[in-house]
Each structure stands twice: as C-alpha cells, then as structure tokens.
Image (spheres, rainbow, N blue to C red):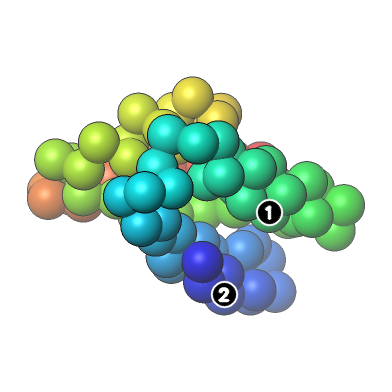
Amino acid sequence: MRVDRLPDHWFLSKLYLLPAFQGSGLGSRLLQGLISDARMVRLPVRLTVLEVNPAFRFYERHGFEVTASVPPRIHMERG
C-alpha cells in the first residue's frame, strides 16, 4: 500500500494483495484504516483505477465515487 499525503488530499497510488490474501477482508481493513485516518485530518482520499480492473467495484463498495473518467482510467474520491 502506498499513499501520497498531499496538502489538500491523500492519493492512494497502490493497494496490492497477493492472491492468497485476496478475499480475506485484509484489503478492506487496510482501506478502512486509511479512510478513517484521512477523515481525522479532514481530507478526501483519491485514487485512479483502470476501467477493466475488478478493484473498481471494491472501491465503490467502500464509498468511493467516480469524479472523472478518462479511458482507460477512472478517477475516484471518498470524502
């Protein structure tokens, strides 16, 4: 997991799990921790995901909303 903490938002640039750990809830716990930390400092979390990446639905389930779509990427944010 890599997060760039910028003055006006935090950018989640990487969240990778080995296949053996996918579906175990670990990714959700990591993401929820990040969202909680960002909320404490009152900053949104932003990210970019490829249109074909199944992680798009994962981020939607965690409250991220599409802010822009520039194929092949989707830009998302959670305040």
Percent x, y of residue 10: 62, 64
As drawn, 32 above or below 9: above
- Residue at (43, 67) in percent of width and height: 13
Say which element carries label 2: strand
Q: Is residue 64 above or below residue 70?
A: above
Q: Which amino acid, by three-letter code, is at mark 2?
A: Asp
The residue sitting at 87% across, 52% down in the picture is 40
Q: Residue at x 50, y 36 (%)?
A: 24
Q: Which residue is mark 2?
A: 4
- Location of the C terminus by quadrant is top right
Task: State the image coordinates of residue 76 (x, y, percent, origin top left).
Answer: 42, 44
Q: Which mark is residue 73?
A: none
Which one is earlier in the sequence, the residue at label 1 or at label 2? 2
> Where 47 sits versus 61, above or below?
below
Find out whether the residues at labels 1 and 2 contact each other: C-beta distance under 8 Å. no
Question: x%, y% of residue 31?
Answer: 60, 47
Mark 2 surroundings within 10 Å by alpha-carbon count, few (fewer than 14), some (14 through 19), many (20 or more): few
Mark carried by residue 34? 1
Is residue 75 visible in the rendered structure shown here?
Answer: no
Return the residue nearer the eye: 4 or 9: 4
Q: Could you tell me which secondary element the residue under label 1 belongs to? A: helix
Name the kind of residue labelled 1 in the image: Leu
Place residue 63 in its image quadrant. top right
Front residue (pair 75, 12): 12
Q: Residue at x 55, y 36 (%)?
A: 25
Measure the alpha-carbon separation of dots 1 and 2: 11 Å
Q: Residue furthest front?
A: 20
